[in-house]
Amino acid sequence: MNRYFPYASAYERWLLGDEEALQERHVGYHAGFHWSERHLQCLWFDARYRPAVFPLPNNETVTVLDPGVWNLEAGPDFLNATLLIQPGGRHLRGDVELHVHPADWDLHKHSTDTAYEHVVAHVTWFGGTTPKSLPARVLSLSLGEPITARRDLSLDDIDLKAYPHSVLPGTPRPCGAFLKNDPGRARDILQAAGHYRLQAKAERIRARLQESRDRHQLFYEELMAALGYKYNQQAFRGLARLVPAAQIKGLSRDVAFAKLLAAGRLLPGPESAMDEEGRQMIRMLWDLSWKQAGEVPEGELNWCFHNLRPQNAPVRRLAIAATLFSGLRDLLCDIEKLASSAGATWFQSAQERLTVNMEWPFWNQRLTFSSPPDPTHPHALLGDGRRAAIITNVILPFVAAEGLLPAEAVCYLPPEDISSPMRLTALHLFGRDHNPAVFYADNGLLQQGLIQIHLDFCLNASSDCEGCTFCNALSL
């Protein structure tokens, strides 16, 4: 990966500093686990994801009554949790530490750290042998088996930015004093952070490729999840598993669209359309879906429609999916053929491939089935910002994982729509009066760097930023 992301290791050294911090914060991606410890923290914290019951030896079980307070400082991941042990109704109160492997307890030397004296549960992804230094009173709980048994859940769909964190005040942050007047240094740091983030994405994809027998299906799932955006990412990935890529390839665009809508239970009634063209389109899709009635898979998908812009509605995004994956052309194969291109040419060609066949008069003139057509204000099915996001988050990491990314291509990463984490982190780093065009607005790589710094520092920062290693590193 170093040839694609040469500055990633520099950011990691600068970010983590000493070896002990490196062991605690960095988890390598490999077959069997290709996420981060923060994903495990989200699993433990969120009752929607956390297993309802954990088995213990001697036919006992553990139920989590309270996951505890998410600890943003040094020490155990969660403080003052409450567990219920059955039979007997015994309550256990104390702290919880999470790791990927049981042996990480020994590796991080928690047994010699007084901050971990009140730990009552050691929660890991993998099961296995109890760590040698783990006190006998501490429960060993495993997340991996019950989570992977759920077909409706993928850790890839957890929004890490959505979980509790300190809210920093609007007053100037210490890091701003070092960077707001030094755009050259700021861009160097953001570039290195962007390399680090993209390399992690590629390593995760490579780990999943080692496990998957169908790389085309994996690519399809990843791109579908990207189309779902943050609100419907999980539902889109679930639909991609209900209707695999192999079932769509070779179909016409209309048939593929009908198949996806039917499987997702998203086909509206003809009466919902405001004009005859809309009603005819819906009736045609119903006819196509009825012809495949015996092939419609059963599955429960939880769609979110609240507070969605019409451009992000699931039905419209599925029209994009039908365009990208139907027919005889293969999107992944087309992208692979670009491996010999120069960096800037690669991105231009990838963008063009994403917009091939995106001319769909019905959807280019309206946003929803129920909206009237408006030829005077055309609507692109796939806008520039979303197209850039798909290239950054799916296509580039995928081809990098397979060694097919042209050298230096990452330097030409197109900008995405500026998100709230980007804007907030830029405010902290460069001050309220900074010019986004100078620091990050026109460069997708620098935007990725902002997101990475947000996750590594701002998301868990104390309100006064005291002890922030980012500020400490800037002062050197």
Image: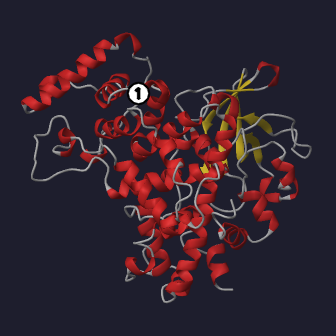
Residue identifier under label 1 = 250
**Residue 153 drawn at (x, y percent):** 54, 33
Q: Which residue is at the front of the view, 386 or 412?
A: 412
- Figure quadrant of the N terminus: bottom right
Query: In the picture shown, does residue 423 fall above or below 268?
Result: below
Indicate the amino acid at tag 1: Gly
Residue at left offset 85%, top offset 53%? 107
Q: Nearer the viewer, residue 111 or 184?
A: 184
374 relative position to 402: left or right:
left
Q: Residue at x 58, y 59 (%)?
A: 198
Residue at the image point whose x is 38% and y is 78% from the top? 437
In the rendered view, does 17 fall on the left or right side of 386? right
Specify the farthest residue to the left.
Answer: 275
Residue 228: percent from left, percent from top: 40, 42
Which element is circle 1 on? Answer: loop
266 sits left or right of 447 in the view: left
